[in-house]
Image (tube, grey):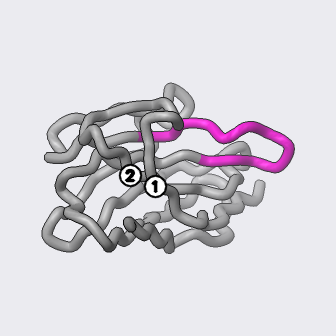
Amino acid sequence: QVQLVESGGGLVQAGGSLRLSCAVSGRTFSNYGMGWFRQAPGKEREFVAAINWSGYSTYYADSVKGRCTISRDNAKNTVYLQMNSLKPEDTAVYYCAAGGSGWVSYQTSEYDYWGQGTQVTVSS
């Protein structure tokens, strides 16, 4: 069983930055592609960013491209999401997910394990 625990969320003013972390345990972390998704109240869960098993391939939603950076440290079993120039519309619960294929994917169906989420609130 794979467990994912997100941290780093909080309240920040528009234009500020946050760094989310997701610690993974239970299986070989470096086998998994990792993704970040978010869900705002009353909306469907949406893709934010993804990284492949090695960290050499990444993919971003257009809404965050240029403002967010996904990275991973396979030695620490952790994936990160650095978010800059935050906007009120970035407010959501952010989830990390692990996919067994190891590749980059924007589709929720490609991910086998999910964390509980961390709240990000951006005030205007």
On the rendered structure, is 19 left or right of 89?
A: left
| Residue 44 on the magenta span | yes
Task: Give the residue type that dot 1 points to.
Answer: Tyr
Nearer to us in this view, 93 or 1: 1
> Badge 2: how crowded within 10 Å, few (<14), some, or many (20+)?
many
Considering every residue shown, the one lying at the far front of the view is 1
Residue 106, how many percent across, how many down?
45, 31
Q: Is residue 68 above or below residue 9?
A: above
**CA neighbours of label 1 inside 10 A, class few (<14), some (14 to 19), many (20+):** some
Quadrant the C terminus occupies: bottom right
Task: Name the residue carrying label 2.
Answer: 98
Relative to 109, residue 86 above or below: below
Residue assigned mark 1: 113
Q: Residue at x 19, y 51 (%)?
A: 31
Residue at horizontal 51%, vertical 57%? 114
**Which residue lies at the image location 44% right of the left edge and 67% below the top edge?**
4
Amino acid carrying mark 2 in the image: Ala
CA gap, disc 1 to disc 2? 5 Å
What residue sits 26% from the left and 66% below the top? 27
Q: Are marks 1 and 2 in contact (CB under 8 Å)?
A: yes
User: Residue 82, located in which quarter of the rendered image?
Assistant: bottom left
Residue toward you, 11 or 97: 97
- The kind of secondary structure element at disc 2 is strand
Residue 78 at x, y percent in the picture: 30, 67
Residues in magenta, as a range: 38-49
